[in-house]
Amino acid sequence: MKPLLACLAFFTTTNLTVGGTGYEVTAQQDGKPVTYMVNFGGGFNFEQYTAYDPVSKKFVYLQWPRNADVPKPVSQVWNHESGQTVKLYQFPDIKHPLSVIPSMEAMKFCPITGDGKFKAKPVIAYD
């Protein structure tokens, strides 16, 4: 019983840091649920950007070693509604540059269905 208590004490008193999180997203399309996975954040050895490619209709990832330089944007566009300049990055195997989705909280609409009331649940922590 003592080893079990020691393990519980370790996990409840230690700050565990996680590099990235995988989310299960459930959105509605035509009254039917659409569920998929999306990852945000890097791991112990790598950093990662996440984007959605509307042509291939999938989430894509740009990864680089944690000790390397951060990828530079290949272009930028000005958003006339917000007045912000959005940086665009070249993602592997994608023909056109895309904007980064910085986090799950920053994603206000499901890019697959357009649902603004989607639910996201963290299901994987990786580092």
Image (cartoon, grey):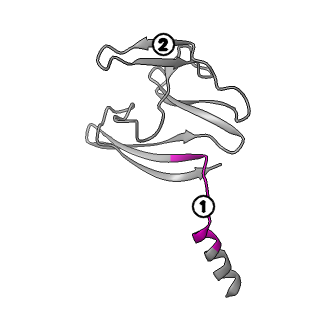
Residue placed most toward the observer, 119 or 64: 64
Residue pictured at 26% horizontal, 37% vertical: 30
Q: Amino acid at mark 1?
A: Asn
Mark sitting earlier along the chain (1/2): 1
Magenta residue check for 13: yes
Residue pictured at 50% horizontal, 28% vertical: 51
Q: Residue furthest bottom?
A: 1
Q: Is 63 placed above or below 123 here?
A: above
Q: Amino acid at mark 2?
A: Gln
- Of circles 1 and 2, the one toward us is 1
Residue pictured at 68% horizontal, 37% vertical: 46
Dot 2 crowding, Cα within 10 Å, few <14, some 14–19, many 20+: some
Q: Is 116 placed above or below 69 here?
A: below
Residue placed most toward the observer, 8 or 83: 83
Picture quarter containing residue 48?
Answer: top right
Residue 115 horizontal side relative to residue 78, left or right: left
Residue at numbered disc 1: 15
Residue 36 horizontal side relative to residue 92, left or right: left
Residue 124 at x, y percent in the picture: 55, 52
Residue at numbered disc 2: 76
- The mark found on residue 82 in the picture is none
Residue pictured at 37% horizontal, 35% vertical: 110
Provide the residue span drawn in magenta: 10-22
Tell how many labels: 2
Q: Residue furthest left?
A: 31
Per the model, the C-alpha gap separating discs 1 and 2 is 38 Å
Residue 45 at x, y percent in the picture: 72, 41
